[in-house]
Image (cartoon, helix red, strand yellow):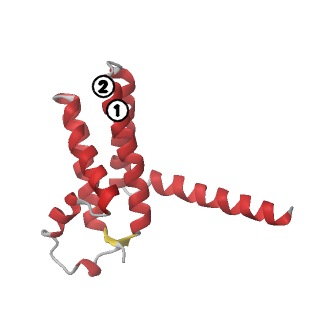
Amino acid sequence: MGIPKPLVQFNQAFIVVCVMLSFFTTTWVLLAPFIVGMITLLTKQNPIMKIGKQFLRQEASSYPLEERDQQLFNQWIATICLGLSLLFFITNLPVISAAFSIMVLIAAGVALMGYCIGCTIRYRYIMWKYKRKKQKQAA
């Protein structure tokens, strides 16, 4: 079963808002999406999507569905980048910290506009593995 697109977008908007807030307040705001990401990766249940599910107007299955594995892959990327941003913030490297949070902001923002950077990365990775496997079989 896939994930309803509005829930995916709700999670993306949450990430965008948190990263934007971190630029105007404190980098510690990034703890919120980082913790949500960790919970999601550990339990395969996204707390933000659970909250968003309450606001769906139709049955969840009536919305366009996003692939669960792809969303987990995207969550891995975002969580790692947010974790690195926090780590570089703690170690007093604000420029590198900002770079990682900006990458997350751009990826989530562009995803809200319809283009999934994580999908492209995952697709290329899967194709690379497939080609590598074919080369080994041919040898």
Report if the CB atoms under discs 1 and 2 are less than 8 Å apart.
yes
Asked if residue 135 is positioned above or below residue 31 in the image, the reply reads below
The x and y percentages for residue 68 are 39, 67
Residue type at the position of mark 2: Phe
Residue type at the position of mark 1: Ser
Rendered-image quadrant of the N terminus: bottom left
Q: Nearer the viewer, residue 17 or 48?
A: 48
- Mark identifier at residue 85: 1
- Dividing the picture into quarters, in which one does residue 97 lie? top left
Tag 1 secondary structure: helix
Q: Residue furthest top?
A: 92
The x and y percentages for residue 73 are 43, 56
- Residue at the (15%, 29%) spot, across then down: 25
Residue 75 visible at all: yes
Rendered-image quadrant of the C terminus: bottom right
The x and y percentages for residue 69 are 43, 65
- Residue at the (33%, 21%) spot, across then down: 91
Callout 2 crowding tier (Cα within 10 Å): few <14, some 14–19, many ≥20: some
- Dividing the picture into quarters, in which one does residue 28 lie? top left
Q: Residue furthest left?
A: 54
How far apart in space, not on screen, are marks 1 and 2 (Cα)? 6 Å
Q: Which residue is mark 2?
A: 89
Residue 106 visible at all: no
